Amino acid sequence: MYRVLLPVDENESRARAQATAVRDLPGAATDVSVDVLHVREETGGTDAEWAAGGFAEEYADEMARVTDDDSLPASVEAAVDALEEGDLEWRVRTATRDPADAILEAAAASDSDAIVVGVEGRSPVGKALFGSVAQSVILEGDRPVTVVSDE
């Protein structure tokens, strides 16, 4: 079975385009399994009240929200829907840390054969200079990376 890591951000059309690219691979329905990964960036710093020894209820609510898998963005559902249209085997995973590091770690942990990243549609020059996450995955990864635009 060919295993693909599909890291998605919050952009629904980009996630759908990534999943469609995987779904359209030859033999995908029988020979491809997909790990849909949504990475939340680590929050930078602590709440001032928390740092001063107090406790902000808003801080606790936000921490519960960002660690709750039920609060996944609609882009994850868009990717899964596109995969299901092709009868692909899939599972959803989450991580909270630097996105590029999380993607590379997930690819290694699941022994992915390839990574399919999404990028914003850009100008001709911008297309050559991918977003920082995609660029890091391409340059630091040890497996094939396919880049898909939502345009």
Image (spheres, helix red, strand yellow):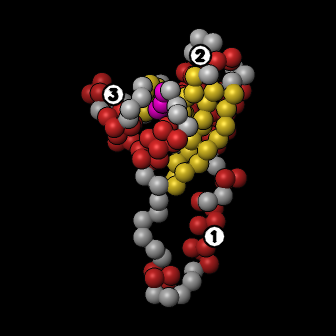
Indicate the amino acid at tag 3.
Answer: Lys
Q: Is 55 situated above or below 119?
A: below
Callout 3–callout 1 Cβ contact below 8 Å: no
- Within-10-Å neighbours for mark 1: few <14, some 14–19, many 20+: few
Q: Secondary structure at mark 2?
A: loop
- Tell me the tag on residue 24: 2
Which residue matches tag 3?
127
Residue at image location 47% in from the left, 63% down from the top: 43
Q: Indicate left or right for 78 with 147 as reference.
A: right
> How far apart in space, not on screen, are marks 1 and 2 (Cα)?
40 Å
The region drawn magenta spans: 114-118
| Residue 38 located left or right of residue 89 | left
Q: Which mark is residue 108?
A: none
Q: Which residue is mark 1?
A: 61
Which amino acid type corresponds to the residue marked 1 in the rendered image? Asp
Q: Distance from label 3 to label 1 (Cα)?
A: 38 Å
